[in-house]
Image: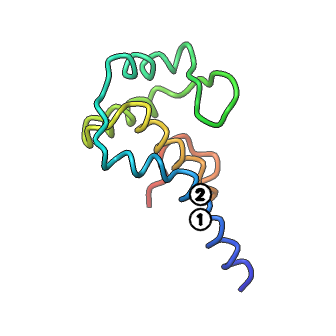
Amino acid sequence: MAAQMAKELWETVELKKHKPNFLSLYKNLPKSAEQREKVRKASTEGIAIQGQQGARLLPEQLLTEAFILSDLFDIGELAALELLLADTSDSACPGTETSCRV
């Protein structure tokens, strides 16, 4: 019982943490060439991720998924990348680099 309550609390905290990203989906923020270029270079030059220190090199497959998500939902590339990174940090899928699929 306590484990289930802890899990629900953790999920609530995670949702609140990423609430701005989810809300920005409704705002339809314009995409920018600058963001796209920044994300494109993340596999070779690294990219600063919100809430983390320093630049982080990311796998090309993750960047490709971010571009697809960005194009599909007409959101900024950085927002798409942050949503994917939030998905990969899910404890149900430890060690995965891309989204956890069932």
Q: Are marks 2 and 1 in contact (CB under 8 Å)?
A: yes
Label of residue 14 in the image: 2
Q: Count all numbered tags in the image, as a single digit.
A: 2
Relative depth, front residue between 69 and 74: 74
User: Where residue 94 sits in the image (x, y, percent)?
Assistant: 64, 51
Above/below status of 32 relative to 44: below
Q: Is 20 positioned to the left or the right of 34 in the image?
A: right
Q: Is 27 positioned to the left or the right of 15 in the image?
A: left
Above/below status of 86 relative to 5: above
**Is the C terminus in the top left, top right, bottom left or bottom right quadrant?**
bottom left
Q: Which residue is mark 1?
A: 11
Looking at this rendering, what residue extends furthest in the front direction?
27
User: Where residue 8 sits in the image (x, y, percent)?
Assistant: 61, 73
Residue at the spot 57% in from the left edge and 45% down from the top edge: 96
Alpha carbon distance from label 2 to label 1:
5 Å
Residue at the spot 43% in from the left edge and 29% down from the top edge: 63
Q: Secondary structure at mark 2?
A: helix
Q: Secondary structure at mark 1?
A: helix
Within 10 Å of disc 2 (Cα), the crowding (few <14, some 14-19, many 20+) is: few
**Is the N terminus in the top left, top right, bottom left or bottom right quadrant?**
bottom right
Looking at this rendering, what residue extends furthest in the bottom direction?
1
User: Where residue 95 sits in the image (x, y, percent)?
Assistant: 63, 46
User: Where residue 28 sits in the image (x, y, percent)?
Assistant: 28, 41
Relative depth, front residue between 68 and 19: 19
Q: Is 35 positioned to the left or the right of 4 in the image?
A: left
Relative depth, front residue between 68 and 13: 13
* Amino acid residing under circle 2: Glu
Residue at the spot 42% in from the left edge and 51% down from the top edge: 22
* Amino acid residing under circle 1: Glu
Within 10 Å of disc 1 (Cα), the crowding (few <14, some 14-19, many 20+) is: few
